[in-house]
């Protein structure tokens, strides 16, 4: 079964707004990664946060990890139309297991 | 960054035929590659781990005789869907781990859209 469940399944916001996506998982992990997928394309790695880290930043991305709650969040600040894509969390224990994904739509 | 290519990007075939999909790491070597399957608007499901010089490791429920994997060199893994049927129609994506091994980020190919008529 899939490791991660993401919330919301779909999110529609206007350009300039912030987008927050949440990911919950079930078992212990070594790290958690976030990936982006444009429609019909491969995945692009965004950011990796290790199990002993609580927060990480990369440009307009902010990721948090709460291992006690087995959850993570991805915040995209000042969103752009080009951020429109599906976003997946993926947990790594012995292998990489993907969550259900959030489809983000950013409108002008 | 590291680049992974896949060929073909899309293929349409008749039921009962076999289809081969190639996954190449273009500027780095990959002793391990991963094959995923993705249905429309769904997540990626790991099918198998391709190991250079040894047999592939298949996930539970994936038929190894149906999905043949060959890791021919340090830059090439192939997935052959044998005797394809319409239910095999899907988006197949490969990935290879970057520096530091499978523990760290994966580099994904652009995917192959398979349609079986």
Image (spheres, rainbow, N blue to C red):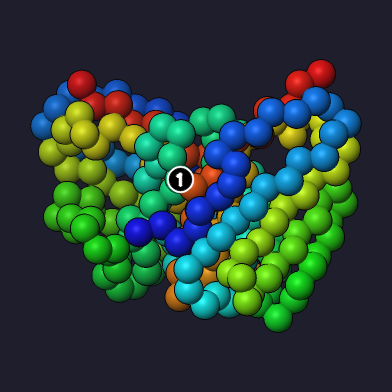
Question: Which residue is denoted by mark 1 in the rendering?
Answer: B43
Task: Name the residue: 23% across, 43% down.
Answer: B81
Quadrant assignment for the N terminus of chain A: bottom left
Task: Name the residue: 85% across, 34% down.
Answer: A17
Q: Position of residue A15 (x, y in %)?
A: 84, 27
Quadrant assignment for the C terminus of chain A: top right
In front of the other: A73 or B85: A73
Query: Vertically, is A42 above or below B32?
Result: above
Task: Name the residue: 30% across, 73% down.
Answer: B54
Task: Name the residue at the bottom extreme.
Answer: A52
- 10 Å crowding of disc 1: few (<14), some (14-19), many (20+): many
Q: Position of residue B98 (x, y in %)?
A: 61, 65
**Residue B8 in sight:** no
Task: Name the residue: 24% across, 63% down.
Answer: B60
Name the image quarter holding residue B91.
Answer: top left
Name the image quarter holding residue A63.
Answer: bottom right
Task: Name the residue at the front extreme.
Answer: A69
Q: Is residue B13 left or right of residue A85?
A: left
Q: Position of residue A31 (x, y in %)?
A: 61, 72
**Residue A80 in sight:** yes
Query: Vertically, is B99 above or below A88?
Result: below
In front of the other: A9 or B103: A9
* Numbered disc 1: secondary structure: loop
């Amino acid at each position: 079964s899939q490791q991660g469940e993401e919330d919301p399944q779909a999110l529609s916001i206007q350009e300039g707004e912030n987008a927050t996506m949440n990911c919950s998982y079930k078992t212990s992990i070594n790290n958690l990664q976030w990936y982006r997928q444009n429609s019909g394309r491969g995945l692009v790695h965004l950011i990796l946060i290790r199990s002993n880290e609580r927060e990480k930043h990369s440009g307009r991305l902010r990721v948090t990890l709460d291992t006690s709650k087995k959850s993570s969040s991805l915040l995209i600040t000042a969103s752009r139309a080009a951020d429109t894509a599906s976003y997946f969390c993926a947990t790594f224990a012995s292998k990489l297991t993907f969550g259900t994904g959030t489809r983000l739509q950013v409108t002008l | 960054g590291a680049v992974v290519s896949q060929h073909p990007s899309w293929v349409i075939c008749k039921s009962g035929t076999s289809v081969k999909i190639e996954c190449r790491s273009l500027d780095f070597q990959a002793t391990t590659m991963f094959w995923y399957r993705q249905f429309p608007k769904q997540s990626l499901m790991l099918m198998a781990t391709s190991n250079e010089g040894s047999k592939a490791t298949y996930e539970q429920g994936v038929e190894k005789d149906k999905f043949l994997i060959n890791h021919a060199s340090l830059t090439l893994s192939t997935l052959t869907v044998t005797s394809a049927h319409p239910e095999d129609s899907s988006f197949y994506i490969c990935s290879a781990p970057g520096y530091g091994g499978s523990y760290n980020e994966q580099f994904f190919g652009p995917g192959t859209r398979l349609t079986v008529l």
